[in-house]
Image (cartoon, rainbow, N blue to C red):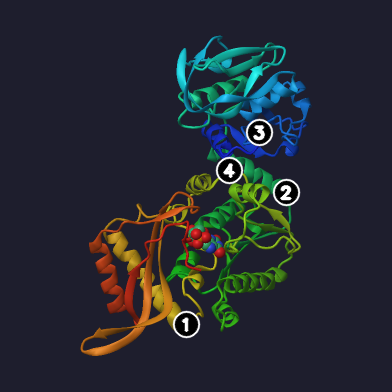
Amino acid sequence: MDKIVVINFGSQYNELIVRRIRSLKVFALLLNPSQLDLKDKEIKGIILSGGPFSVNEKNALMINEEIFNLNVPILSICYGMQLINKMLGGQVETSLNKEFGKTEIKIIEDSPLSKDLPFTFNVWMSHNDVVTRIADNFNILAISNTNKIAMIKHLEKDIYGVQFHPEVDNTEYGLQILDNFIEICQIKREYDMPNFIKTKIKEIKDIVQDKKVICALSGGVDSSVVALLLDRAIPNQFIGVFINHGFLRKDEEIEVSNLYKNILKTPITIINAEDEFLNALKGVIDPEEKRKIIGKTFISEFQKVSEKYLVDFLAQGTLYTDIIESGYNSAKTIKSHHNVGGLPKDLNFTLIEPLKTLFKDEVRLLGKELGLPETIYNRQPFPGPGLAIRIIGEINKNDLLALKEAHQILDEEIKKDNLQFSIWQYFIVLTPIRTVGVMGDSRTYGKVAIIRAVTSKDGMTADYFKFPYATLERISLRLVNEVKGITRVVYDITSKPPSTIEWE
Ligand code: XMP
């Protein structure tokens, strides 16, 4: 697919550039400088991103200077603009009076990049260094109100630079500037979900040919979308496997099997492995150990099924954020996430990851386009290990049943007040702490249940949801009255950070 590539020099807005370009119906990808393939004929435009460094530092990130001879339009932003100036003979220096935040700029020479822009407007600047002399064969197109170079263009080639950030909301006409760049690239605007489906189906058919593909399904949006794509592309060669680990919400395993019956032409294989998982977790208290055991048991169950079929490919719902994060992050492990799709790469299959260029919201759109019910494509996140990480400490069957009931009550009461769309994720945590209660005239001695409900955009940070007291009261009353073993209910009012969303 024709695309614009965004070269990553480390700016915190890089993903945003990709999203903005995609919102204008052009496919865009984020690449490290070394990943740029100069022979890739599908690249119709290159954006050099901003970054936190100085081009004058000894180990400054560079780009192959051959890009200037490619005849592909280039838009360089902030660090990107300083870099091309330096590479092409200009001068970049650290400025004493810096530009941060809202800054007015004035267009002093028209160009295709400033089409439909007013003469003056506000942009968002964030830089320490400035271009103090532009490279030979470049023209200044705009200056800021403190007389700094804000926009430049090569005299003959479609090489542009902007000192500000067109990708952020605070830059007026920022989207127009990116739109103008797309026009300069003369790239077709054909990136939408129907076209994505067509391209992916063809790609899957070409790769798989007459071989077989296996895919682990969870009922979640990512694996369901992968299954729908495979089902459309290669219906008779696709083996969908749903391993029920027993830690799903009440009746969820029935809903999941019905879902796949309704949306797929190919029947799926269902493995009920509740006992295997419960046995493997006997006596285990440590959350990390729990996750690892669940992951291992999952793989061994999956391996047992896959050995029955002669399968060459394994399909997974890896998302673009997983790829970006694993490529650019060296953050510490807070929790080792287990994802149903995330099987280890040494399973002796070739991987097919049809969603690996998509953001989560795009996967939801894709699911909608493929006919997935709204309850699935807009489903709130549910962790791979399921309720197992919501029972603190050792898991037993009774607690699991109690937690399923408790979650059901929470869900019903939240929906009664129509709050489900205002909360990003909600659930009950069952603790091993026992406290004294009184019911009727008798003493009780049961467990503490915790209500957790958070608002969030992406799960990376979260705040606790401000429930109406009346809703909390109803939930508490029902939990204590209807769920055997719960004598006390508390509400978790910590945000993330410092806490995490799940308790384990
Ligand atoms: P935490 O607890 O780390 O959770 O703040 C952030 C988001 O990730 C979900 N989560 C998981 N998802 N496998 C998953 O697929 C896991 O092991 C896992 N652990 C946490 C959590 O529900 C929240 O949405």
Disc 3/disc 1 C-alpha distance (Å)? 51 Å
Question: Dot 3, crowdedness within 10 Å: few (<14), some or many (≥20)?
Answer: many
Disc 2/disc 3 C-alpha distance (Å)? 24 Å
Based on the displayed image, in which of its 4 quarters is residue 231 positioned?
bottom right
Mark toward the start of the polypeptide (3 vs 1): 3
Mark toward the start of the polypeptide (2 vs 1): 2
Residue 181: % across, % down: 58, 22
Residue that label 3 marks: 5
Residue 292: % across, % down: 62, 71
Residue that label 4 marks: 197
- Asked if the residue under mark 3 is in contact with the one under mark 2, i.e. CB atoms within 8 Å, the reply is no
Disc 2/disc 1 C-alpha distance (Å)? 44 Å
Based on the displayed image, in which of its 4 quarters is residue 423 positioned?
bottom left
Residue that label 1 marks: 397
Mark toward the start of the polypeptide (4 vs 2): 4
Kind of residue indicated by mark 4? Ile
Kind of residue indicated by mark 2? Ile
Is the distance from the Cβ of mark 4 to the nearest ligand 1 atom less than 8 Å?
no
Question: Dot 4, crowdedness within 10 Å: few (<14), some or many (≥20)?
Answer: some
Disc 4/disc 3 C-alpha distance (Å)? 21 Å
Kind of residue indicated by mark 1? Lys
In this orientation, does residue 219 appear? no
Which one is nearer the viewer's eye here, 354 or 60? 60
Choose mark 4 or mark 1, whichever is in front.
Answer: 1
Local secondary structure at mark 2: helix
Question: Dot 1, crowdedness within 10 Å: few (<14), some or many (≥20)?
Answer: few
Of the numbered discs in the image, which one, if any, rests on residue 243? none
Residue 18: % across, % down: 58, 36
